[in-house]
Image: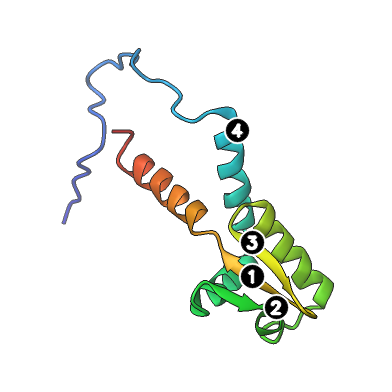
Amino acid sequence: MSLVMTNAPDKSEPYVCNLDLRLRLGEVESEQFALAFKALSNPIRVQILDLISQGGGQICGCDIERHFDLTQPTISHHLKVLRDGGLITSEPRGVWVAHRINFGMLTALQGLLMLVNNTGR
């Protein structure tokens, strides 16, 4: 059985530079996306984001801490990275902190991935 790659370039034809290509993302926007992807590059942070999503987009810090064999400062560090990446917001609620998903950032990341997945169209 042979596989045919439909997106493979025809190597018999010479490559011609595409002068219509342009940068679609500005420096600030690119930096924001990079911070978000960096935040998602750690499995613990992906799990934390998943936990928050299970709570309807908002949960208390105590609901996060009980799932990990990590110290509270380590959990706080992961939450800070998620905040810095724009993926969550946090709000004090007495002795605990409520963490919410930033759906605007998730929508922006989804849009970027869809744009890139559509081969730039």
Q: Is residue 85 above or below residue 118?
A: below
Three-letter amino acid code at the position of disc 3: Thr
Q: Work out how far the residue at label 3 is from the one at label 4, CA to CA, in angstroms.
A: 20 Å
The span from disc 1 to disc 2 (Cα, nearest Å) is 7 Å
Between the residue at mark 1 and the residue at mark 4, the CA separation in whole angstroms equals 25 Å
- Helix, strand or loop at disc 2? helix
Q: Is 20 located above or below residue 33 in the figure?
A: above
Please report whichever mark, 2 or 4, sits nearer to the chain's N-terminal start: 4
User: Could you say where residue 17 lies in the image, as x and y percent from the top left?
Assistant: 35, 14
Write down the quadrant of residue 100 in the picture.
bottom right
Image coordinates for residue 66, horizontal then vertical, percent: 70, 87
26 left or right of 92?
Answer: left
Q: Position of residue 96 (x, y in %)?
A: 75, 79
Residue lying at 18% horizontally and 46% vertically, measured from the top left: 4
> Which residue corresponds to mark 3?
89
Sequence-earlier tag: 2 or 3: 2
Q: How many marks?
A: 4
Q: Which residue is mark 4?
A: 28
Packing grade of label 3 (10 A; few <14, some 14-19, many >=20) is some
Closer-to-camera residue (80/45): 80
SS at mark 1 in the image: strand
Q: Image quadrant for the C terminus?
A: top left
The CA span between labels 2 and 4 is 30 Å
Res 67 → quadrant: bottom right
Residue at the disc numbered 1: 99
Instruction: Please name the residue that numbered disc 2 is placed on.
Output: 61
Gap in Å between the C-alphas at discs 2 and 3? Answer: 12 Å
Q: In 3D space, how far apart are the residues under numbered discs 3 and 1 (Cα atoms)?
A: 6 Å
Q: Residue furthest bottom?
A: 66
Looking at the rendered structure, the kind of residue marked 4 is Val
